[in-house]
Image: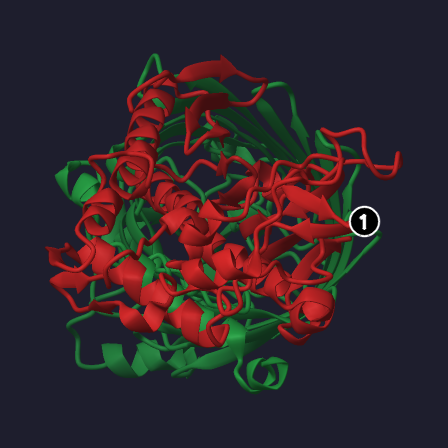
Chain colours: A red, B green
Amino acid sequence: MNKNRTVQLIKNKDGYGITFNAMASPCEVIIQSMDKPLVTQLADLITNEVWRIEDKYSRYNKLSVCSAINNNAGRSVSIDQETYLLLNFAEQCYQLSDGLFDISSGVLRKVWSFKGDKNETDNFPTVKKINAMLCRVGWRKIHFDQTQIILAKGMEIDFGGIGKEYAVDRAIQVAKQLTQSPVLVNLGGDLAVTSCRLNNEPWQVAIEHPDSNSDSYDNTSTDMIVSLKTGALATSGDARRYLIKDGKRYSHILNAKTGWPINDAPRSITVVAPQCIQAGILATLGLLQGNHAEEFLTEQEIQYWARR
Amino acid sequence: MKNKLEKINVKAVLTIATAALLSTSNPVLANSTKVDTDSSNVSEEGSWDFDSAFLFYSEVDRVSAGEVIINAQKTFANDEILNLKLTVDALTGASANGAVAQPNVQTFTRPSGNGQYTIEAGETPLDDTFHDTRVQLNGQWTQPIAPNYTASGGVHLSKEYDYLSLGINGNIAFDFDRKNSTFSAGFSYFQDTFTPEGGIPNAFSSMLIGDSSSASWDDNFSQTRIDADDTKTTTDILLGFTQVINRRMITQFNYSYSTVDGYLNDPFKVISVVNSETGLTQDNIYESRPDSRVKQSVYAQSLYHFDSSVLDVSYRYMWDDWEITSHTIDSRFRIPLGDSFGKESYLQPHFRFYQQSAAEFYQPFLIDGSALPNYASADYRIGEMTAFTVGLKYGLLVDNGHELSFRLEYYHQAPEDAGFDTPGELKDIELYPTIDAIIAQVTYSF
């Protein structure tokens, strides 16, 4: 699991950039300070925190708390305060979305395979398979309290929908407590800042267009530049993960209640909110509204960009 | 489903859920000595920021002052800012009483009327009874009132043993051109009450000299007094314009109009009446100034960011209807030292130049037998003078990113010879003594 855990420091004109890999994404921390010992300490604290969260909640890590819970479905697994709070947060998201957002829906990936192939898939799941797998999904079948969690047999949970954004927020807390210098934390496109840049200048953040790394669809794809003075920004959706059957494009956003992809969901949604995890959930909840995504986001009176 | 979502304020619920998730301490943080485990930064309200400063000011052979400043500022959720400032200063030492030096010992009565003091031959007369403690409170509230409009209002209270100052102020600022330009307009109003011990002296009455323990002293002294207290009011109007020139440069222009009405004398100052032949003092009479003053000034400031250092230069031109004009040039240059001499340390040289012309009624002394003018004051502070300050500030970040700074400055003030004919003995007397002072300050932000 500790493959490729290196940190690079790059000196910029008015500060340092810290780059590393975590959660299968390129990560970057920018600090507007020339104080190298401070930067080194910040790099140390933030990477430790992000990797700690990755190790603790990644379903790919066999030693993670997540794996321990999943491998012991049907039995009680004791949990700590942090895990309890994350589960509590997931519960709130489940209720807010009326069951559309469910961290136990990851097992549906076993029947759905989104490769982003432009050709017709020959691997489209059958209704029977989907319904069989749907029996293993359902937040209501999970019981937890402050000290323990019990999953029904065959179930799995996955913190993938909130873990990265949570790590951004924790990293921002670490940075704020260490320094007053402006800091931006970017974990694979989900990012937050501690404050505006020096002289009250905003951070200029480029949001990658969903198609920027693929040659499909339109040719007008450009990165979008967003000015950010405070708070966080998160993007949900991945244009490279879809499949095509009978000419219809199925997004990888799955309805946890039906087991089927959400129809007419935007390809990606970017949201600005005070905290990254909040931005991430709002973007995801937006996607889950399908063709009502923009309507839903507008009602929330938040700043967002939906790309279709 | 959609209907149900509409009924819930998703954003509000998520804000609460996020606060619950992020407001706990973390094992990694708890183990770090650098970090405060009581992490409460989920709240949108900022915590209080404090600045504290201790300042020491000492003029050679004259006044010394110690000052403590505590400044507290808090920013609320909607960018409202509350600023509270407490200043306490203590002043001790001697101040020129306005009389000229003489070739013989001189005796003066203290402003209170209780006792007298003597000044050696050739020495500038200084009243050494100055000791006062001043407590000053300022409160300021600033908030956005509409897009691009910011309003601010404040109150001021300052109390000394014999002085009370109350003030209010208001300001409105308007941003335009994508916040590259700001126009502001403000006013302030102060009412000051002076209750000097011994009362307010009658202008141009003679300072009573004699046996202060005699039975008739108190009656005779009160003859020189007109009242127990007096007041003055000050109204200021300030117009400002700030312009961002480019990423590196910002400029500011201000115009201010200030009118002061009421008691503008210094009740502690006298002016010597000397013999036109010998130059010897015949009498010391209390000074007299007009009861109004209109001051105007224009001010320009420019801040320039070089790659790492910052240059701050300002110029002020002031003129008033007492015919005082002044020029002030103030410049600071901030040089970051990196981390070689303390974390994020910097040096900041400071240079200030000040030149002032005299008030029309300024006179170092009066000639006995000449017609008394309407107004006269020998207060060196309204005479012609040149002054400069050179200083150096050193700052660094200490634990938890708090800033600590030290400032040391030297101030030199040189009055100009006002060009009056100096009769007799006054030719050999220093009428325009210079003042040298040292200013030391320690500031800590937390």
Placement of the N terminus of chain A among the 4 image quadrants: top left
Q: Nearer the viewer, residue A138 or B99?
A: A138
Residue sitting at 63 percent across and 62 percent down?
A: A262
Q: Which residue is mark 1?
A: A247
| Quarter of the figure with residue A68 | top left
Left/right placement of residue A100 relative to residue A303 reads: left
Q: Amino acid at mark 1?
A: Gly
Q: Nearer the viewer, residue B364 or B405?
A: B405
Residue A207 in sight in this render: yes
Residue B38 in sight in this render: no
Q: Which secondary structure lies at badge 1? A: loop
Residue sitting at 73 percent across and 48 percent down?
A: A245
Question: Is B68 located above or below residue B202 in the figure?
Answer: above
Q: Nearer the viewer, residue B29 or B95?
A: B29
Image spot of residue A209 (x, y percent):
73, 39
Question: Is B77 located above or below residue A175 in the figure?
Answer: below
Image spot of residue B330 (x, y percent):
61, 33
Question: Is A255 located above or below residue B165 in the figure?
Answer: above
Left/right placement of residue B293 relative to residue A48 reads: right
